[in-house]
Structures are given as structure tokens and as C-alpha cells.
Image: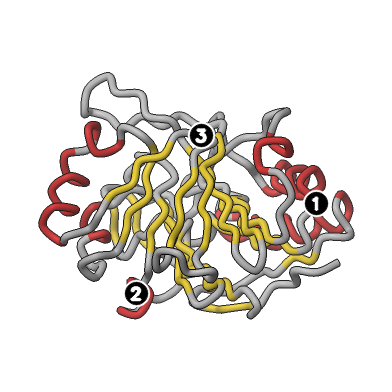
């Protein structure tokens, strides 16, 4: 069975592998605080159908309790260790919806799927170079994570991260990389990949395929005219940069709601 990747916008992606659906950082709203969705329709109800949900870190555009409330009871949440203690809304929605929570530290893993089922996936948490705090809920420091989903292929979901020297060793071999290439504002702070740094990451990781995410969806209200190329251009620029720095990697640049069976063999 081949892997299928569907991008719903921002960092929200469905990865289907071996009949198991994994959803990343679900964000299903038209507006979040000062951000509004400027491109792509809201994900349809079926986007919330998943066997497990990966939460990369605690920032509100990645851990959004109201979006988690759309999940079916029994959907497993896989979160950074300490996330339930740091975010009361996560605890409340998990209890109210009957969502079992697995907390992982970097290097730890868990299985998704029926027990003893050979088709079950393994999810391994890997470090990310990103500030994982969620203010104003006190001084909790919860690590930001990426995840490697292993089934018929190994799919790396980076969450939010900057480049760091140990990245290839921490991730290990992978066939598909879901890489953030932008942000939600006209300036990217520390701990982020822009299009060029994401292309460098692709060159170092050497997957068969890369899918750019985390761009071209949300933008601050009132800043439409401020550096608009930072909203529109990162996906195309990543594709261009990857062609220069990682020509052996196939880039699948998706539209909102679009799916692809990425190349997983060399």
C-alpha cells in the first residue's frame, strides 16, 4: 500500500499509511486571535477523521483545543511530554471527548493500530529546534517535537523547527518529509525554516519526496499589504531552492485539500 498525504493548510496534514490515518496539528477555524484564514476553504468534516493525532508543540496554531473537539471519541492524541499539565484546555477536551493521550519525549515511540496488528504504525518523537512554551500558562517548558511515522514508508513531520546539526541523525532515514517553509506573519523568528533553510533540510535528510507545509494559509488581520510575498511565495520558492540544493528529492507542492501519493522509492 502506498502512502497518501493530504494537506489541509498550515501544519494540518493527513498521512494515510497501511490503512491507518494520522492527522497533524489540526487547525479547523477561519480565525485564530489576530490571524485569519486567507487561502483555502476550511477543511471538511472528514479531515477530522483519524486514528491518531500528532501535536508537535503547544503554540496555539498547532495545539488548538476547539479543533481537537471535532475528533471522534477514542482518537488517540500523541503530544509532547508535559503538554496536558501545561494546557488546561487540552485536558478538558480530552476528558470530554474521550481522547486517550500519549505523552512522548524525544526518542520515545508508540504504536498506532490494533494490538499485535502487523499493519500498525510506529510513531517516534524527535527533537525540534523551536520554543515549545505556551503562554500565559505559567513557566512550563514543554519540548517541541517532530515525529517519524513508520509503516510502508517513513514519513517525517517536522512541526516547527529550525535547522540544527543533529537533525539528520535524530530523524534517521525517511522516504517522505513534511517540511515547514513559511509562517503566519511577515517575519520569521528563531526556530523556523524558511524556503531556503527547508531546502537545506531536504538536502541533509535526503528523502525521496518532500511536501512543503506551514505557509499560505493564515495571515495577521490588517497586514495584507505588508510583505505579501512572504504569504504567497514560500511553497514555490522551496520548490526552486530544492531543485538547486536537493535535485534528487521530488517536491510535491499541494493546494489546500489536495492529496498526493508521494514517491517513496529511489
Residue 53 found in image quarter? bottom left
226 on left or right of 97: right
Give the residue at mark 2. 49
Q: Is residue 230 visible?
A: no
Q: Are marks 3 and 1 in contact (CB under 8 Å)?
A: no
Q: Going from the N terminus, do you reach mark 1 or mark 2 first?
A: 2
Q: Quadrant of residue 193?
A: top right
Any mark on residue 106, and which? 3
Circle 1 SS class? loop
- Depicted 33 relative to depicted 176: above or below: above
Residue at the disc numbered 1: 206
Residue 212 at least partly seen: yes
Q: Residue at x 41, y 32 (%)?
A: 132
Left or right of residue 22: residue 199: right
Can you give x and y, in whole percent of width and height, for residue 231 in the image? 55, 56
Which image quadrant: the C terminus? bottom right
Which residue: 75% across, 69% down?
A: 264
Figure colour scheme? secondary structure
Q: Position of residue 261 (x, y in %)?
A: 66, 78
Residue name at image x 23 percent, y 67 percent: 70
How packed mark 2 is, by other alpha carbons closer than 10 Å (few <14, some 14-19, many 20 or more), is: some
Vertical arrangement, residue 39 with respect to residue 228, above or below: below
User: How many angstroms separate mark 2 from mark 3 (CA)?
Assistant: 26 Å
Q: Position of residue 126 (x, y in %)?
A: 56, 39
Circle 3 — which element?
loop
Between 126 and 185, the one nearer to me in the picture: 126
Q: Is residue 225 left or right of residue 156?
A: left
Q: Is 262 situated above or below 35?
A: below
Q: Residue at x 37, y 68 (%)?
A: 51
Amino acid at each position: 500500500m502506498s502512502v497518501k498525504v493530504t494537506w489541509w493548510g498550515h501544519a494540518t496534514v493527513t498521512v494515510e499509511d497501511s490503512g491507518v490515518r494520522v492527522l497533524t496539528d489540526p487547525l479547523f477555524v477561519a480565525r485564530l486571535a489576530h490571524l485569519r484564514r486567507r487561502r483555502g476553504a476550511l477543511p471538511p468534516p472528514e479531515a477530522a477523521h483519524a486514528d491518531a493525532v500528532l501535536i508537535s508543540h503547544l503554540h496555539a496554531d498547532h495545539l488548538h483545543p476547539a479543533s481537537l473537539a471535532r475528533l471522534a471519541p477514542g482518537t488517540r492524541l500523541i503530544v509532547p511530554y508535559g503538554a496536558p499539565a501545561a494546557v488546561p484546555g487540552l485536558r478538558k477536551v480530552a476528558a470530554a471527548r474521550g481522547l486517550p493521550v500519549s505523552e512522548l519525549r524525544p526518542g520515545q515511540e508508540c504504536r498506532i493500530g490494533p494490538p499485535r496488528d502487523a499493519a500498525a504504525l510506529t510513531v517516534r518523537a524527535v527533537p525540534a529546534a523551536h520554543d515549545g512554551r505556551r503562554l500565559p500558562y505559567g513557566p512550563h517548558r514543554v519540548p517541541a517535537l517532530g515525529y517519524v511515522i513508520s509503516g510502508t514508508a517513513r514519513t517525517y513531520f517536522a512541526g516547527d523547527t529550525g535547522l540544527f546539526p543533529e537533525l539528520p541523525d535524530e530523524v534517521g532515514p525517511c522516504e517522505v518529509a513534511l517540511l515547514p517553509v513559511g509562517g503566519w506573519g511577515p517575519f520569521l523568528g528563531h526556530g523556523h525554516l524558511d524556503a531556503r533553510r527547508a531546502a537545506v533540510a531536504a538536502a541533509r535528510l535526503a528523502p525521496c519526496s518532500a511536501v512543503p507545509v506551514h505557509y499560505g494559509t493564515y495571515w495577521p488581520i490588517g497586514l495584507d499589504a505588508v510583505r505579501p510575498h512572504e504569504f504567497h511565495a514560500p511553497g514555490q520558492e522551496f520548490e526552486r531552492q530544492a531543485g538547486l540544493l536537493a535535485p534528487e528529492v521530488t517536491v510535491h507542492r499541494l493546494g489546500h485539500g489536495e492529496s498526493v501519493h508521494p514517491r517513496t522509492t529511489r
